[in-house]
Amino acid sequence: MAGLFAKIAAGEIPSYKCAGDDRFYAFLDINPLVKGHTLVIPRREVDYIFDLTDEELAAMTVFAKRVAAAIKEAFPCRKVGMAVLGLEVPHAHIHLIPMNSEKDMLFSNPKLKVDSEEMEAIAAKIRSNFERQG
């Protein structure tokens, strides 16, 4: 039985899509630390990121790099931080978080409440930047 993120990637559960191809999918975190907080997942259901093949892990990182560039363009910031935690959902994923200080990456910070209309606008902005990269 497919897990939550596999269902999101398959379009069975709605998400705020930022980018995607045949192997990876990027969507907004519904409990963001900051606006633009995005998750990148492999479409293939794998619990632990280091259980991906070397080629999959490398390709996922390159895909995440492109998503990060799209996020940085949408949300001007000093850097886009990358974190791999992986305990809350049993599907490998990378958090991409626009940051102006390291405090923006503290997962103990209160999560933002962003309404669905704004979430869609954020996703559309990132998606447009990603697609423009070619």
Image: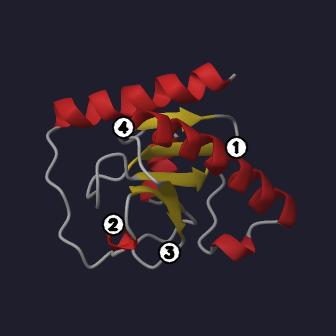
First-in-chain label (3 vs 2): 3
| Pointers 2 and 1 in contact (C-beta within 8 Å) | no
Q: Tag 1: Cα neighbours inside 10 Å, few (<14), some, or many (≥20)?
A: some
In the image, is residue 101 above or below residue 62? below
Q: Which residue is mark 4?
A: 16
Of the 4 image quadrants, the one containing the C terminus is top right
The amino acid pointed to by label 3 is Gly
Residue 23's disc is: 1
Percent across and percent down for residue 67 are: 57, 42
Q: Residue shown at 45%/32% (left/top)?
A: 126
The amino acid pointed to by label 4 is Tyr
Instruction: State left or right for residue 92 relative to residue 16.
Output: right
Kindly report the distance in space between the C-alpha atoms of the residues bearing marks 4 and 3.
20 Å
Of discs 3 and 2, which sits in the foreground?
Answer: 2
Q: Residue shown at 35%/53% (left/top)?
A: 29
Kindly report the distance in space between the C-alpha atoms of the residues bearing marks 4 and 2.
21 Å
Instruction: State left or right for residue 51 relative to residue 68.
Output: right
Q: Nearer the viewer, residue 75 or 82?
A: 75
Percent across and percent down for residue 124 are: 38, 26
Residue 104's disc is: 2
Kindly report the distance in space between the C-alpha atoms of the residues bearing marks 3 and 2.
18 Å
